[in-house]
Image (spheres, rainbow, N blue to C red):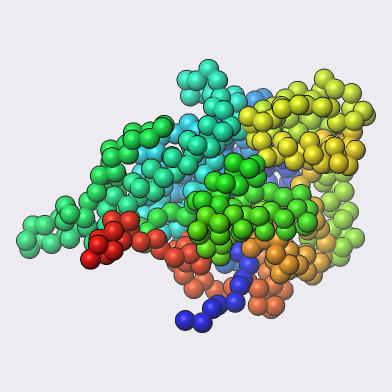
Amino acid sequence: MPTLPRQLKFGAILTGVGTAQNEWLHPQIPGDASVDIDWYRAQAQQAEAAKFDLVFIVDSPYITPDSAPHFLNRLEPLTLLSAIAGATSKIGLVATLTTSYTEPFNVARQFASLDHISGGRAGWNVVTTGLEGAAGNFGREQHIDHTERYRRAAEHLEVVQGLWDSYEDDAFVRDKQNKVFLDPQRQHRLDHHGEFFSVTGPLNIARSAQGQPVIFQAGISESGRGLAANYAEGIFAGVGNFEDAQAYYSDIKKRTAAAGRNPDHVTILPGISPIIADTNEQAQAIDRERNGELDLNKALVQLGRPFNYHDFSQYPLDEPFPDLGDLGSNGYRGHAENIKQVARDQGLTLRQAALRFAKPFSSFVGSPKTVADEIERWFVEGAVDGFNIHVGAPEDFARFTDQVLPLLRARGLFRSEYSHSTLRGHLGLPVPVNRHTAARAAAA
């Protein structure tokens, strides 16, 4: 078979009233968007009409009164995506769910169910929960240590994938004439006994049209990169600039190859919030209007989130960014370390750092051609495989789908129609062979 030309992949991040502090103030965003299923359905249908690969739902299990509006009041991701599945037919459906405070059997069953409901379009964004306050919501006095969280995540994920292979593809005979529903030789217990979990199995649901849900990951710490190299089929990790993106892309692809996996089977999709107008000058003016006068107090709260909502208001604003030592090492370590390094390398004050990291990633601001050119540069020069586009106001998303995507299609960089109906198909991923079927074939 000839090798198909490499094409961009796109996801749509659906965050209702927004994960930035002031996004909900936009007149086109309903104040209850984060709990309005009709809003989500409409955005997902718009993304599907534009032939996006997937929609992505972010999540975390802990909030404070100062959390961003979307975090304060939002729908549970798997319930939400099950509802979206019925309003769409092609687009992938990816949800975040933590391994730190869930049990593998429940997770395996939930995602397998979504995969069946959607006809093979489910994906799981595997996270380890960086917020220490989450421990109190799950009966723990202390948050799980960072290193232990990633060991637990790896075992959790292996158990889930083992449970997804409980049934071989031909297990259910469904022969009414001979009254045979199941071939018991094609059903398999897991009998896992590990450091964190003991799970007997089998799972009580068959494999889906795509074999197993697609595995995504978003960590940028050393542990996160290791988990991604061994398991991830898609990566949502954020990066600060083009050079950092190139370095991250190269590192992940090399690690994946070293782990004995095909680097082409890992799709890297950082999140961006494009600002598009008729001219570059108009787009830059919109950027300044939206992000130029951020509420400093809210920016300090947002800065504190990767550090487990550390209170940055206690420090002088116009002195160098404070020395935080190991603070953040047991939270969102990769993001926390990135903030500290950028502040140190660029000599930022606390005020400058707060405003810098409160703003959306702004390399993609300009006319449709400018944004398309920048997307093409990142793609062609080995920084990304595509992007997760943040969906805010409908007119902003429409600018991207109606004005930027046609330019990319004309350059042969993005599809005009779907050629597959599963998420694995969209991403060019093979259907994983059931491990028990593979073992039988190897023995034969």
Splitting the image into 4 quarters, where does residue 55 fall? bottom right
Q: Is residue 95 left or right of residue 337?
A: left
Report whether residue 365 is seen.
Answer: yes
Q: Is residue 156 left or right of residue 310?
A: left
Question: Which residue is located at x 44 percent, y 34 percent?
Answer: 102
Report whether residue 85 is seen.
Answer: no
On the image, the x and y values in percent for residue 416 come to 59, 74
Please tell me which residue lies in front, 368 or 341.
341
Splitting the image into 4 quarters, where does residue 157 fall? top left
On the image, the x and y values in percent for residue 275 come to 78, 56
Compared with residue 178, is residue 417 higher up or lower down, i.e. above or below? below
Splitting the image into 4 quarters, where does residue 71 fall? top right
Please tell me which residue lies in front, 47 or 258.
258
On the image, the x and y values in percent for residue 217 come to 56, 48
User: Among all residues in the image, which is located at the extreme left?
Assistant: 178
Question: Which residue is located at x 50 percent, y 59 percent?
Answer: 261
Total numbered labels: 0
On the image, the x and y values in percent for residue 162 come to 35, 47
Please tell me which residue lies in front, 102 or 116.
102
